[in-house]
């Protein structure tokens, strides 16, 4: 589908109980006035006092939308984990649309984000290698002069857009992937051995089913299908969700975020060729995921454990965790 204006792009908002953040997301979306708005609500957690009232307040916010549009709602009757709630909402969304924008309840988009999505959703709608359009740039510099975005092996999900054709490849439990197949999948993407080892360890951890997350599985699904992502040259979406009501971002990230959104110019200039920006990806690895530091700490742990008596290992465990 070709979109002729930003208002034609379907928008999904994934909401739970945070009124103060989701109202800002809705206010940002209202500036665009999408003709088709989808909202997915998680149910209150019966084990958390006050959840019912908070969820009711959020749901009432969407009872009267301030512009003419079609509103389709998914209202959960049972509380789901963050992973199941978000992935279920996205799958529900793509069961009805071929492409669109996904915003969690703490991701506030700037106007340029919608123009950026309009252009890239149209341009790459039939390009199966392009599987994700990020709204975030955590580096703020890694581009060629005059280009509005670059191609990356990494996908950021604090405001993004995509296609049903790509999401169909998502495997939330990575049940279809084996360690040897995963290793074959990541080696073409990541050139450094430390990156390969880090993500292989993450894969094995997620394979155990212990993590309540969904975005890393999405990254792995993209790699498995030899796809890649589009990353804007500057940040287009702000995450305002750090705090006590957050699920996975309770403490502020150590990674510095851009101070403001890029709203100055909606003109999109495409890269001259479709090549991964390897320099930017290495910087993303080091700055965002801190893989180099993590691997140094891991190697330090191994060296220390080889030379210390068992009785001392537990005593230094907390110190090494702090170094990480």
Image (cartoon, rainbow, N blue to C red):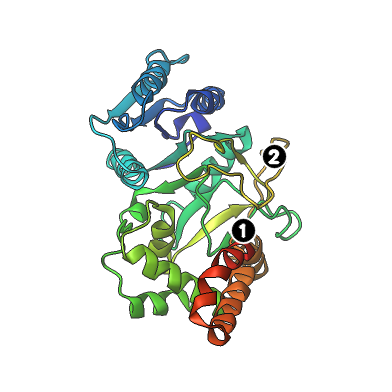
The residue sitting at the bottom extreme is 307
Asked if residue 192 can be seen in this view, the reply is no
* Frontmost residue, 52 versus 170: 52
Mark 2 burial class by Cα count in 10 Å: few <14, some 14-19, many 20+: some
For the point 52% across and 40% down, the residue is: 118
Q: Which mark is residue 288?
A: 1
Q: Does the CB distance between marks 2 and 1 fall below 8 Å?
A: no
Q: Is residue 311 above or below residue 129?
A: below
The residue sitting at the right extreme is 145
Q: Quadrant of the C terminus?
A: bottom right
Q: Is residue 186 above or below residue 97?
A: below
Q: Is residue 189 left or right of residue 268?
A: left
Which of pointers 2 and 1 lies earlier in the amino acid sequence? 2
Q: Is residue 180 above or below residue 43?
A: below
For the point 74% across and 54% down, the residue is: 146
Asked if residue 162 can be seen in this view, the reply is yes
Give the residue pinned by disc 2: 262
Closer to the camera: disc 2 or disc 1?
A: 1
Q: Which mark is residue 241?
A: none
For the point 40% across and 27% down, the residue is: 37
Please provide percent x and percent y for residue 4.
49, 35
User: Which quadrant of the figure has residue 81?
Assistant: top left
User: Which quadrant of the figure has residue 173?
Assistant: bottom left
Q: Is residue 219 above or below residue 296?
A: above
* Frontmost residue, 264 versus 38: 38
């Amino acid at each position: 589908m070709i979109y002729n204006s930003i208002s034609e792009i379907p928008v999904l908002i994934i909401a739970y109980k945070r009124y103060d953040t989701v109202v800002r997301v809705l206010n940002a979306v209202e500036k665009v006035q999408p003709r088709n708005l989808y909202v997915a609500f998680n149910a209150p957690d019966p084990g958390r006092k006050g959840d019912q009232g908070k969820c009711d307040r959020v749901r009432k916010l969407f009872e009267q939308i301030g512009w003419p549009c079609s509103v389709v709602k998914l209202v959960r009757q049972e509380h789901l984990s963050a992973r199941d709630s978000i992935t279920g909402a996205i799958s529900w969304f793509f069961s009805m649309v071929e492409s669109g924008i996904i915003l969690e309840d703490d991701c506030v988009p700037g106007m340029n984000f919608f123009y950026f999505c309009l252009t890239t959703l149209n341009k790459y709608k039939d390009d199966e290698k392009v599987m994700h359009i990020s709204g975030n740039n955590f580096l703020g510099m890694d581009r060629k002069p005059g280009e509005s975005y670059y191609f990356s092996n990494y996908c950021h999900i604090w405001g993004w857009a995509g296609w049903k054709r790509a999401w169909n490849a998502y495997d939330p439990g990575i049940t279809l992937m084996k360690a040897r197949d995963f290793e074959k999948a990541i080696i073409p993407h990541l050139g450094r051995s430390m990156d390969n080892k880090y993500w292989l360890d993450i894969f094995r951890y997620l394979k155990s089913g212990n993590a309540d997350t969904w975005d890393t599985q999405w990254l792995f699904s993209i790699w498995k299908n030899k796809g890649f992502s589009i990353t804007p040259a500057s940040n287009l979406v702000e995450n305002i969700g750090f705090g006590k009501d957050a699920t996975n971002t309770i403490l502020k990230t150590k990674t510095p975020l851009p101070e403001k959104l890029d709203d100055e110019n909606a003109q999109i200039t495409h890269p001259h060729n479709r090549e991964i920006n390897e320099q930017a990806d290495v910087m993303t690895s080091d700055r965002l995921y801190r893989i180099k530091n993590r691997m140094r700490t891991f190697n330090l742990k191994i060296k220390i454990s080889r030379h210390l008596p068992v009785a001392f290992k537990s005593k230094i465990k907390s110190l090494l965790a702090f170094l990480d």
